[in-house]
Amino acid sequence: MKIGLLGLPGSGKTTIFNALTGADVPVGGYGSGKAEPNLAVVTVADERVDRLAEMYRPKKVVYATIEFVDFVGFSEGVARGGGFSPAHMALIRTMDALALVIRNFPSDLEGDPEPLRDLESIETELVLSDLILVEQRLERISEALKKGKKTTELAAEQNLLLRIQERLNENRPLRGMEFSGEEERIISGFQFVSKKPVLVIVNSSETNFGKDRALLEALEERFRTIEFAGTFEMELARLHDDEEAKLFMDDMGISESARSRLTRFAYETLGYISFLTVGPDEVRAWTLRKGERAIDAAGTIHSDLARGFIRAECFSYEELIECGSEKAVKDKGRFRLEGKDYVVRDGDILSIRFSV
């Protein structure tokens, strides 16, 4: 899973990035749109993987991961002004989801916080960047039609993009717009940013953290929202003494690290689950979208498994813990053989039978 951190200058994106990843990137370092984004891959803590590793004693233990990308802060008008380089924008479009960081602390440069206005500004820029992409594509289609290159596929794409253009011109994101399966196929290559899942991170100061319920409720009307005391949690992530860290967390009323809270929040908000594979060689957690099937899980492991899929041997983590061993799972009739259309559930332990 790849999550891109986006926000206006001074929103504290890099502070949040450091809090989530334990990195030590200098904050406030982006002076222009030419700056390279910060990248970090973090492991997803999972007690189930820990327990399975104790049971199987594998040679290797692999946790699921999330890649966080901290993009340069952008100002209003950046889409039309070309503030994002093509390579920069292309990377944003590869993200699975966007985390919009909203400032909720006073700043000498930016003044008092205006979280709702900032959110609206970011959304407008995302919509505008998609509109520019659509306009450019429609121009190329028009030129092709003038040269007599009219095809059924080109006409279908043009009609669809005109519908999309109309919506974007109303400053409405593509998120929530309904598309048929064929239409999804046509637009898949565009990777529209206003169509991507979004979650909001409110970056508060220590003094106002947890004290503005009305703000969070207003933001929740638009997107799933989580609040961090960014600077505090960045410093917390740098502590090596667990007992000292817990004392600071207790003072702030925080029960888990920013990483743990956002990881769980992201899985819930974006509709991801984890399935597991076990054995003496490796115990591993894999990430899958909720509602995806056994054939998708096979492809997540390796394309050959999906290509030659026969059956999925399946039982749940809870059943394994309850029964105590794989043998006991089978003896109690909990061991299942599922076909490619089986919808994988969180905590399923799978072994794919395949033949290529």
Image: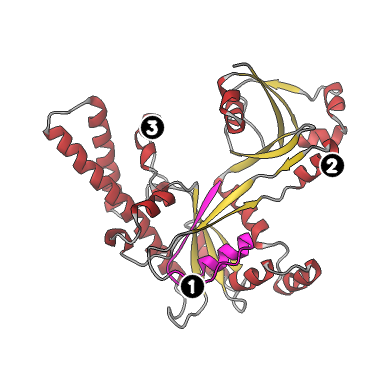
The image shows residue 280, relative to residue 257, as above or below, that is above
- The quadrant of the rendering that contains the C terminus is top right
Q: Amino acid at mark 3?
A: Arg
Camera-nearest residue between 261 and 225 = 261
Judged left or right of residue 172, residue 275 is right
Alpha carbon distance from label 3 to label 2: 44 Å
| Picture quadrant where residue 352 is located | top right
Say if residue 341 shows up in the picture: no
Percent coordinates x, y for residue 166 in the rendering:
26, 47
Q: Nearer the viewer, mark 1 or mark 3?
A: 1
Residue at mark 2: 54
Q: Nearer the viewer, mark 3 or mark 2?
A: 2
Percent coordinates x, y for residue 242 in the rendering:
78, 66
Camera-nearest residue between 116 and 306 = 306
Counting residues from the N terminus, which is met first, the one under dot 1 or under dot 3?
Answer: 1
Camera-nearest residue between 229 and 286 = 286
Q: Which mark is residue 28?
A: 1
Q: What are the residue bounds of the magenta stretch?
A: 1-30
Residue at mark 3: 185
Judged left or right of residue 280, residue 264 is left
Crowding near the residue tagged with mark 2, few <14, some 14–19, many ≥20 C-alpha atoms within 10 Å: few
Percent coordinates x, y for residue 266 in the rendering:
59, 51
Alpha carbon distance from label 2 to label 1: 43 Å
Q: Residue at x 41, y 47 (%)?
A: 195
Q: Amino acid at mark 1?
A: Gly
Residue at disc 2, secondary structure: helix
| Picture quadrant where residue 230 is located | bottom right
Q: Is residue 58 magenta?
A: no
Crowding near the residue tagged with mark 1, few <14, some 14–19, many ≥20 C-alpha atoms within 10 Å: some
